[in-house]
Amino acid sequence: MLGRNRDVEQVPQALKEAYDDIDDINTYTRQYMHGDPNYIQGKRLSSDELAGFVEKTLLIVGR
């Protein structure tokens, strides 16, 4: 879905510029989606790593 939005004219320029960060956030969160412990494959959630992705997200949404 993210890839489809990259070249659509109706997508705000700010989101287009944040594409790489949004892709990074998506890749990071994918491993924790739906609370499936088998999908996480034993990886522990790092509060420092999570904080970095939260900060990226807040910068994208303008907070």
Image (cartoon, rainbow, N blue to C red):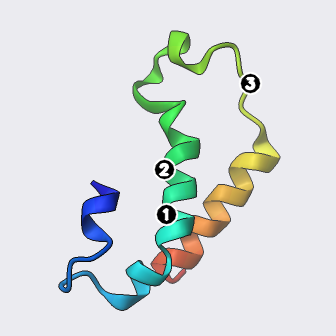
Q: For the residues labelled 3 and 1, say whether their Cβ atoms are less than 8 Å apart.
A: no
Q: For the residues labelled 1 and 2, say whether their Cβ atoms are less than 8 Å apart.
A: yes
Alpha-carbon span between mark 1 and mark 2: 6 Å
- Residue drawn 32% across the image and 72% down it: 6
Residue pushed farthest top? 38
Q: Amino acid at mark 3?
A: Arg
- The image shows residue 35 at horizontal and vertical percentages of 46, 22
Q: For the residues labelled 2 and 3, say whether their Cβ atoms are less than 8 Å apart.
A: no
Q: Residues within 10 Å of mark 3 (few under 14, many from 20)?
A: few
- Quarter of the image where the N terminus is located: bottom left
Residue under label 1:
22
- The image shows residue 58 at horizontal and vertical percentages of 56, 71
- Residue drawn 53% across the image and 9% down it: 38
Q: Is residue 39 above or below residue 55?
A: above
Q: Amino acid at mark 2?
A: Asn
Q: Is residue 54 left or right of residue 7?
A: right
Residue under label 3:
44
Q: Amino acid at mark 1?
A: Ile
- The image shows residue 31 at horizontal and vertical percentages of 54, 31
Kindly state the secondary structure of the residue where label 1 is placed.
Answer: helix
Q: Is residue 14 left or right of residue 24?
A: left
Q: Residues within 10 Å of mark 2 (few under 14, many from 20)?
A: some
Residue pushed farthest right? 48
- The image shows residue 52 at horizontal and vertical percentages of 73, 59
Q: Residues within 10 Å of mark 1 (few under 14, many from 20)?
A: some
Alpha-carbon span between mark 2 and mark 3: 18 Å
Quarter of the image where one finds residue 12: bottom left
- Residue drawn 27% across the image and 76% down it: 7
Residue under label 2:
26
Of marks 3 and 1, the one in the foreground: 1
